[in-house]
């Protein structure tokens, strides 16, 4: 994974991230061909080409040769430790200094996140080896399959053309790619969470037309796994499913309640065993994490704060500045026909999380990542309606064409920016080797101090590492216990 030298406008050398750049270039032909196939009405091959293009786009960032600071390195280390004991999530596998069990950055038992996404990462590394790409493999897979979920959801509501445009926008969605590659805080957890929520809703959609009981059971199982990925926000599935069911059955309350009861029961059966186990095996830590979840609503934790319009402001940064146009258009249309429950399903999926998390003191973009499918469905519906308006020969044809172009161009721009094809990771690659060389042989008996990359050190070598310094008495005590005490030199930091 080398780099390619270029020059910026000032004549200074510019370094290109080769895997990201070339895979991004390789994704262009299938994406263009997919659009061409869709215009011909060949939707199935068009969607398959989208999956190929989306996979290529996601593959480049997944090959980043380093663990990212927030929060991937924590998740990576816990997942690695869970390979040996999946029912005992640990951050510090063998702490040699007294620990604070309630500090999620230095505790041994780690319940800061529910386990399902971590289990997936642990299983991947158990099967294919312990490295950054294998760690990201589950996210790479589900992020790519999310394209198919977006297509299925929008197609069921508004037809194949809207489904394709929504799937295309999902394919090039920069934030989805960034989270799935571990570059953003909450990374793989929110990627898996978004997929499970989308999968549960789409399976419930399918149950309304065919394979009813099988689809409901699988939908319930996916909801249960979503609960095991990020707890109660997964329950957004229930009101969305209710609106879809009532829209399909023309206000059939009895059958809707019956179906949702089965879905909820299956979800509870999936989520309850771990919840009960963790509460009984690690009661004090589980209770503390429960209190911390509540604290997210009263306190801005880890500096993640913002005003009441934080998430609505972030819409433009995630989907492009023009996203407000289709959103306002959709809200206007929905307000004129309150009995149109298909629209209410989309609005619930989109707005309830936005409003709910707007009241929380802690603000993070990952909290609203699961709303990507409804937002892109709205954008795609607006795009297709405007496209038909332009094709009808309306007077505002050129203005309409300009809007159509910008609605695609802005997400493309953000996709390129978030993929960071000009990000030089050579120093981070060198840091990994520097860590391995510093720890040296027999890492299991090494204790490293003064290391701000302590989680990377433990992931790559298996040593015990701390950011803090140690006094002479501590070092002497550790040496007497058979440990090699190492002070981490700056090196490539």
Image: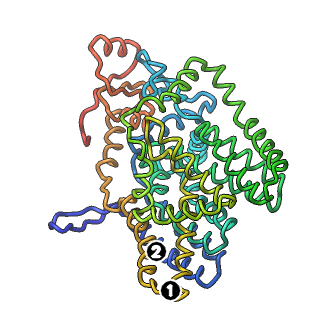
Residue 367, position as x, y percentages in the image:
50, 44
Q: Looking at the image, which residue is at 36% across and 43% down?
A: 432
In this orientation, which residue lies closer to the viewer: 38 or 337? Answer: 337
**Relative to 39, does residue 255 appear above or below in the rendering?**
above
Q: Which mark is residue 218?
A: none
Placement of the N terminus among the 4 image quadrants: bottom left
In this orientation, which residue lies closer to the viewer: 73 or 111? Answer: 111
**Relative to 198, does residue 80 appear above or below in the rendering?**
above
Residue 321, position as x, y percentages in the image:
39, 62
In this orientation, which residue lies closer to the viewer: 138 or 276? Answer: 276
Q: Is residue 54 visible?
A: no
SS class of the residue under badge 2?
helix
Residue that mark 1 sits on = 394
The crowding category of the residue bearing disc 1, from other C-alpha atoms within 10 Å (few below 14, some 14 to 19, many at least 20), is: few
The crowding category of the residue bearing disc 2, from other C-alpha atoms within 10 Å (few below 14, some 14 to 19, many at least 20), is: some
Residue that mark 2 sits on = 28
Q: Looking at the image, which residue is at 66% across and 53% down?
A: 199
Residue 95, position as x, y percentages in the image:
45, 21
In this orientation, which residue lies closer to the viewer: 465 or 185? Answer: 185
Q: Classify residue 443 by image quadrant.
A: top left
Placement of the C terminus among the 4 image quadrants: top left
Q: Looking at the image, which residue is at 44% across and 23% down?
A: 103
Residue found at the far left of this picture:
10
């Amino acid at each position: 994974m080398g780099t390619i030298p270029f020059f910026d406008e000032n004549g200074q050398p510019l370094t290109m991230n080769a895997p990201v750049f070339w895979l991004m270039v390789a994704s262009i032909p299938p994406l263009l061909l997919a659009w061409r196939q869709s215009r011909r009405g060949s939707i199935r091959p068009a969607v398959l080409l989208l999956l190929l293009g989306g996979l290529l786009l996601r593959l480049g960032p997944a090959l980043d040769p380093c663990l990212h600071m927030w929060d991937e390195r924590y998740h990576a280390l816990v997942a690695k430790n869970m390979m040996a004991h999946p029912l005992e999530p640990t951050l510090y596998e063998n702490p040699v200094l007294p620990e604070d069990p309630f500090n999620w950055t230095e505790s041994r038992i780690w319940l800061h996140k529910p386990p399902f996404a971590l289990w997936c990462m642990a299983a991947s590394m158990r099967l294919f080896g312990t490295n950054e790409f294998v760690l990201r493999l589950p996210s790479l897979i589900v992020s790519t399959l999310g394209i198919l979920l977006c297509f299925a959801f929008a197609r069921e509501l508004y037809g194949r053309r809207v489904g394709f445009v929504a799937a295309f926008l999902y394919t090039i969605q920069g934030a989805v790619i960034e989270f799935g590659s571990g570059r953003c805080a909450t990374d793989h957890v929110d990627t898996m969470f978004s997929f499970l929520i989308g999968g549960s809703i789409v399976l419930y959609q399918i149950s309304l037309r065919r394979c009813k009981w099988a689809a409901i059971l699988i939908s319930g199982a996916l909801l249960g796994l979503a609960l095991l990925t990020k707890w109660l926000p997964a329950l957004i599935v229930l009101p969305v499913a209710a609106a879809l069911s009532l829209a399909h059955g023309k206000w059939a309350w009895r059958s809707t309640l019956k179906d949702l009861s089965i879905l909820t029961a299956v979800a509870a059966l999936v989520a309850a065993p771990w919840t009960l186990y963790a509460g009984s095996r690690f009661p004090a830590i589980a209770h503390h994490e429960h209190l911390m979840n509540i604290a997210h609503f009263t306190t801005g934790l880890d500096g993640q704060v913002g005003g009441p319009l934080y998430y609505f402001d972030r819409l433009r940064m995630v989907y492009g500045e023009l996203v407000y146009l289709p959103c306002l258009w959709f809200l206007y249309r929905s307000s004129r026909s309150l009995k149109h429950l298909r629209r209410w399903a989309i609005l619930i999926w989109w707005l309830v999380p936005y409003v709910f998390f707007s009241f929380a003191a802690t603000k993070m973009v990952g909290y609203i990542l699961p709303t990507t499918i409804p937002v892109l469905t709205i954008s795609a519906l607006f795009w297709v309606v405007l496209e038909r308006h332009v094709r009808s020969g309306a007077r505002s044809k050129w203005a309409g064409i300009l809007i159509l172009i910008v609605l695609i161009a802005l997400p493309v721009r953000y996709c390129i920016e978030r993929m960071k094809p000009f990000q030089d990771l050579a120093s981070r690659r060198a840091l990994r080797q520097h860590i391995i060389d510093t720890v040296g042989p027999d890492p299991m008996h090494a204790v490293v101090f003064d290391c701000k990359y302590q989680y990377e050190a433990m992931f790559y070598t298996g040593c015990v590492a701390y950011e803090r310094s140690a006094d002479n008495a501590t070092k002497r005590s550790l040496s007497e216990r058979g440990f090699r005490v190492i002070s981490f030199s700056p090196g490539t930091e």
